[in-house]
Amino acid sequence: MDTTTNKQASDIDVENWVDKWMPAPLRPYCRLARLDRPIGTWLLLLPCWWSLALATDGWPNPAYILLFGLGALVMRGAGCTINDLADRDFDAKVARTATRPIASGAVSPLQAMIFLGLQLGLGLAVLVQFNSYTVWLGISSLGLVVIYPFMKRITYWPQACLGLAFNWGALLGWTAEAGQLQAAPLVLYAAGFFWTLGYDTIYAHQDKADDILIGVKSTALKFGDASKPWISAFYAISLGLICLAGYLAHMTWPFYVGVGLGAVQLAWQVTTLDMNDPKNCLRRFKSNRDFGLIVFWGIVAAQVL
């Protein structure tokens, strides 16, 4: 495969802060953990913050905000390491992923396993700062993290498994504050699940040509040209469930204003989406951080006011 073409197609952005500030031996591990691409950390973190804010009268606990941020950073990295270990043969065949550390040989599978152990240890160190209910609930999500990379081999719905794993924080944020689960966080978890189905279908449209060639599956391939109505439906269900979660948590009007503004953002994604333009898809996918922050600040405003 042509090296120049690989660099142009690669999803690794050179000359970012990792290249400028990190020592050369650490750069492949930073890229393996996707520290140079924080959108995945945001998407893992935001359901945690939503749930924590829903459970908290007034401002959410700053220490918990920081702990969830650190936990999301570490566990997103661990998930990416597991994913790249599982997909190393696939990644080597695709221009966009061929320069990833394991696929390119910059990090060996054994080194990646050791790095994964360090990440999981850090994640556990963060998790044990919470109450025991939250600790055990957090540990119970590891099975989903491990099986997710293999779902694309057997089902057109790997995004469903990602949704189950990536929104576990919608349960943890609540239990960290309340010490038990109730209806509101369960509904919020379901809302996050449908949100993920929407945004990860957009993301998967970047890879559909390569996915067909190497034989992996996605909702983008499942829905094809009919993806927009499906994404719209997923987003609509998510918004409805977020509203229901807020109702169950006794949210006041600023929450609903926030959800309304978030709905505008999601509508922008769908109406301007070009499923055949990878850069367009990536921008819409990344904009889900903005949606998540809008909803979060709507919850905080309702609690504070």
Image (cartoon, rainbow, N blue to C red):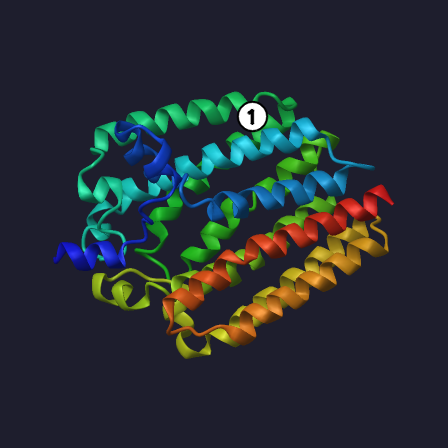
Pick the quarter of the image with the N terminus.
bottom left
Q: Is residue 187 visible?
A: no
Vertical placement of residue 272 versus 83, above or below: below
Q: Residues within 10 Å of mark 1 (few under 14, many from 20)?
A: many
Q: Secondary structure at mark 1?
A: helix
| Residue positioned most to the left | 1
Going by the image, does 9 lie left or right of 274? left
Q: Position of residue 247 (x, y in %)?
A: 81, 54
Pick the quarter of the image with the C terminus.
top right
Looking at the image, which residue is at 80% across and 50% down?
A: 248
Camera-side residue: 182 or 44? 44
Q: Position of residue 205 (x, y in %)?
A: 39, 67
Name the residue beneath numbered marker 1. Answer: 127
Looking at the image, which residue is at 82% across and 54% down?
A: 254
Q: Position of residue 215 (x, y in %)?
A: 24, 62
Camera-side residue: 26 or 262? 26
